[in-house]
Amino acid sequence: MPWNFPFWQVIRFACAALVAGNSGILKHSPNVTGCAVALEELLDAAASRAGAPAELLQTLVIDESIVPQIIPALIADDRVAAATLTGSERAGVAVGSAAGAALKKVVLELGGSDPFVVLDDADLDAAADAAIRSRFGNAGQSCIAAKRWIVQESVADDFVSRIQDRMARLVAGDPADPATNIGPMARDDLRRAVHKQVQDSVTEGATLVAGGVIPDGPGYHYPATLLDNVSTSMTVAREETFGPVACVIRVADDDEAVRVANDTAYGLGASVWSRSERGLAVGTRIRSGALFVNAVVASDARMPFGGLGRSGHGRELGAAGVREFTNVRTVWIGDGAHLPTIAE
């Protein structure tokens, strides 16, 4: 499981797996080992109160350098029935390959480059508020953040102006300070990677509207950054940007909005903003595991969550998430009164 939501991501799979009658082994990200141990203790205490067996979820703490050797062997073990991973494409390929080699089921929730489509009849204030919240929450380190803002040309200037006003009010600083809107990124390598994506996109022709400069001082802070006049061939549109960077892609009409939204290898979530039935009509033409109309993409325990394409496969949460950790079995009980023959 990944570091960016270290408790919620584990609970998403663990509750479904345990409810379905399984036990689990958690290999968490190495920089949130304390969260992993705390979750094991929490679920162990809950199991004890419920009269369930102890150690239904156990944490595997191993040196990161030996993970490539340990994980395939772990998945291949006869006691392991399936594997699930939330993380990067690289990790998904590794775990998916190991599960495939062992002929075992796997659920993968990987990266995303979610489209945030603003049609010309949208409530621009509501859309701008939602765009800011979705893109810059958790310093942009979220797979379901609104990463590509696809805006119809007739309202694009107005939308960008509203975004600039809201971005100017964002406060970067200590995440423990209630006044802070954007905390630091998790690691310096991640900050440098997203900064390179911004620089490459500007070189490719994007307009840097705000941000884009690594600040001095402690912490791996990166400013809220906005790129305008982005095309689908540019780096920020082709790659997942895992940081506080948003890009505006201007389109002429509904058809172009759909084409641009689908011009990606990812397919996790999509958000469409409109005051009319056009919102749902456009949204249903976009390839994604989840569609939110006049709302930001989010994971909800009541609804299945997952993607397609390079965003992975399988579902978490909801009844579908529980079924992912079961084997569907057909049972037929005959009365013996009539046995079919080959002729019949």
Image: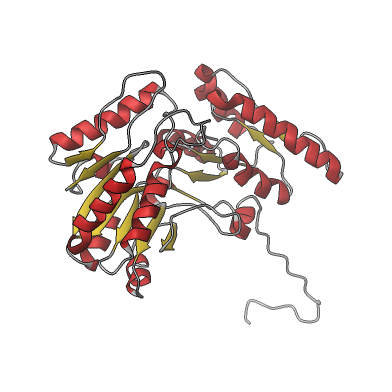
Foreground pick, 213 / 103:
213
Q: In this view of the protein, which residue sits in the foreground, 128 or 91?
A: 128
Residue at image x 37%, y 48%? 132
Residue 54 in the image: x percent, y percent?
81, 35
- The quarter of the displayed image where residue 46 is located: top right
| Residue at 71% over, 32% down | 40
Counting from the top left corner in percent of width and height, residue 16 is at 66, 49
Q: Is residue 73 above or below residue 302?
A: above
Q: Nearer the viewer, residue 105 or 37?
A: 37
Say left or right for 293 vs 2.
Answer: left
Position of residue 94 measured from the top left corner of the image (x, y, whole percent): 46, 33
Quadrant of res 32: top right
Residue 265 visible (yes or no): no
The percent position of residue 51, horizontal first and vertical second, equals 87, 44
Q: What is the total number of numbered labels drawn onto the structure image?
A: 0
The answer, for residue 151, to whether it is visible in the render is yes
Q: Quadrant of the N terminus?
A: top right
37 over 275 or under it: above or below: above
Which quadrant would the C terminus be assigned to in this image? bottom right
Q: How is the image coloured?
A: secondary structure
Q: Left or right: 153 with respect to 105? A: left
